[in-house]
Amino acid sequence: MQTSIITFEFSYERLGYLTGNPSLVIMYFFELAAFVTGLYYWKKFESTSIIWFILFLGYNFLNEVTASTIYIFGWADHTSIFYNVRYPIYFGVYFYLFYQYAVSDRFRQIILMMFGLWCLSYLYFVFTHGIVEGVALFSRVFGGFLLLIVILFFLIEVINNNLTTTLKDVFLVYISIALILNLVVQLPVLTMTYVGWPRVMELNDERRQFFNIIRNASFWVASAMYLIFIYGFYRAKSSNYLMQ
């Protein structure tokens, strides 16, 4: 009988990359804080679709921790699968939330159409690059672009239906603001990182410093996004629909 032995190589360099970057550590802190805050206000939203968003925040943090642990201990050469699996959940949750809050049937049809387009782009990635080692850059950027369009349609619908007086009470408004802030910064940073970072990661000149500044800026923007989520949990009411 043969027995398999799981081996790993702990890397202090990789650990330092994660724990030695204050911007990244702070982002993880606010990411966890947003999930904990959502759990604290669970009863406020338990009869609404927001509970799926709260659960997603918990999954997202756990996914980050798991991928980071595997990266630090060298249990796998690639951790792309954790993020590739996350994308359908990420976009599925957000498109679902906007679908639930939509007032008009036409807007709901637009949301379904855009989510369908994203699913096609993701399936193309899976079949052409593989979910284990491939990087779903196009699907991520394309999905973010579609999500921005949905957010704009949502805000236009709110204005057209004279619902601006209820904005502060609707949690999806806080999600919209946070996502706009995050996506406007993250999408170009994500593209620049995947395209340019492998070429400069071995360098110690201004080019690497420039990329580090960009990445750290994206971490701070993500922290701001989670802070908006936290405030939204506190400020918003439990209503699941704008017309209620």
Image: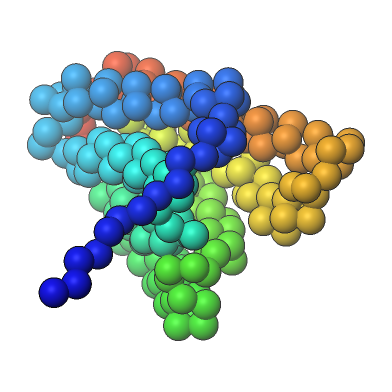
- The residue that appears at 67% across and 56% down in the rendered structure is 194
* Total numbered labels placed on residues in the image: 0
| Nearer to the camera, 211 or 119 | 211
Location of the N terminus (image quadrant): bottom left
Decide if residue 37 is on the left or right side of residue 1: right
- The residue that appears at 36% across and 60% down in the rendered structure is 85
Q: Residue 181: x, y in percent?
A: 58, 35
* Colour mapping: rainbow
Q: Residue 10: x, y in percent?
A: 46, 41
Q: Residue 185: x, y in percent?
A: 65, 40
Residue lying furthest front: 1
Q: Kindly indicate the quadrant of the structure image that contains residue 211.
A: top right
- The residue that appears at 53% across and 33% down in the rendered structure is 12
- Residue 76 seen in this snapshot: yes
Q: Is residue 158 above or below residue 44?
A: below
Decide if residue 181 is on the left or right side of residue 109: right
Q: Kindly indicate the quadrant of the structure image that contains residue 34.
A: top left
Location of the C terminus (image quadrant): top left
